[in-house]
Amino acid sequence: MATNSVTPVHDNFAEEALSSTDQGTRPANGAIVQFLMERVPEFRELQKIRQQGWDNPQGDTYFRQQRNQADKASARTAQFFYQMMQRVGQELHQAVGAFAIQNDNLLQPMVLDMCMAPGGFLATALQLNPNARAVGFSLPVEFGGHKVLMPKSRRVELRFLDITMLAADMGVTAVPVDHPDHGKFLPQQLKPDDLFDLVICDGQVLRTHSREDYRERREARRLAVTQLHLGLKHMRPGGTMVVLLHKLEAWDTVLLLRTVREFATVKVFKPRTSHSKRSSFYMVARNIQSQRPAAVHAIERWKSIWKAATFGTDEEYQKTLQEGQPSVEEVLSEFGSELIRLGKDVWATQARALAEAPFIKQQS
């Protein structure tokens, strides 16, 4: 996820996952990389090409230009990105049925888009499900959020707010008076019986979003667990979550995939039409059994992490992250073959795209 700082090409190739600033994850990340290097040709090829990019300063220039274009998008560029996300949505749906709503209860099909703007994914979801209605959250433009470009519709209830400040929805009713954001936390937005058939969790930290200093190093985590907690908590059993992730081989990503497959059918897909040079990909979790013990445990854990990231000291935050975590050896023994199966196409797609990048081709 993006940050406010200008990152080197290393981060654009590897796109450090949520664990990038967390203590104790580097050994786990290293063990996973070694495991994959020994077993997966597609991953070895990707690492070789990544290294070529790290060695070429022109890669920095390439990705910096992309960031600037995204941060300072003109109306024309913003429209291009909106249409691009619609195409990505169609590609994702055709590949893994990401936006198909299975609702056999004759209830109103409902979609929750956690970070809607500009609205390309939600527009695609509603086009594919003409009977569905939606609730969409979006960071206000005055806070640095994107403009909503999806045409207004009576089928969509749009609420402009910062979802990481939904304290009441995250189980916090009393905020310490000395907290830097005291007074900025928001009242409850989703009632306990607000249930959704499809939840879209593709929000990323925006460099244009002004925040208190305490949030910077933890913001990616706060945003991720807010989306996951609220999305799963308000998921109708049998529903689907579409989640944007980065760097499939990162420890936190591996743990998330391993967790979700305990209560859902998990597929992953990396679009070929856009963002193919980056490590981003989508997890599509279908037939989610949100009332299973594993799901209930995940909901509670994500809430605990949000609380620690929002109110805790560094020590409390790190302790919460590490509580109950399995060893990397245990995870690779039990989940390693599944990780390889899930990741092969994702790594191969990124490797092919990077091999065609100008700063790589000129070295060939």
Image (spheres, rainbow, N blue to C red):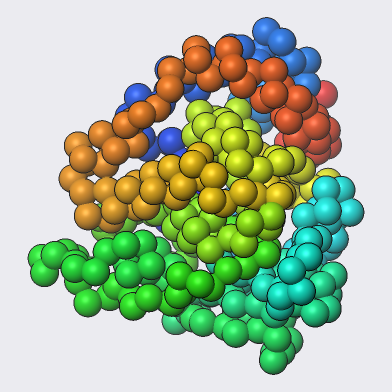
Q: Is residue 210 left or right of residue 348?
A: left
Tell me the quarter of the image containing the C terminus.
Answer: top right
Q: Is residue 30 left or right of residue 317?
A: right
Question: Disc count in the image?
Answer: 0
Of 103 and 266, nearer the camera is 103
Percent of width and height locating residue 167: 32, 67
Of 186 and 280, nearer the camera is 186
Q: Is residue 28 left or right of residue 352?
A: left
Percent of width and height locating residue 331: 53, 19
Q: Residue at x 69, y 55 (%)?
A: 238
Q: On screen, 231 above or below 192?
A: above
Percent of width and height locating residue 249: 60, 28
Percent of width and height locating residue 232: 54, 55
Q: Residue at x 66, y 84 (%)?
A: 156
Q: Residue at x 63, y 36 (%)?
A: 261
Q: Residue at x 43, y 22 (%)?
A: 326
Of 129 and 29, nearer the camera is 129
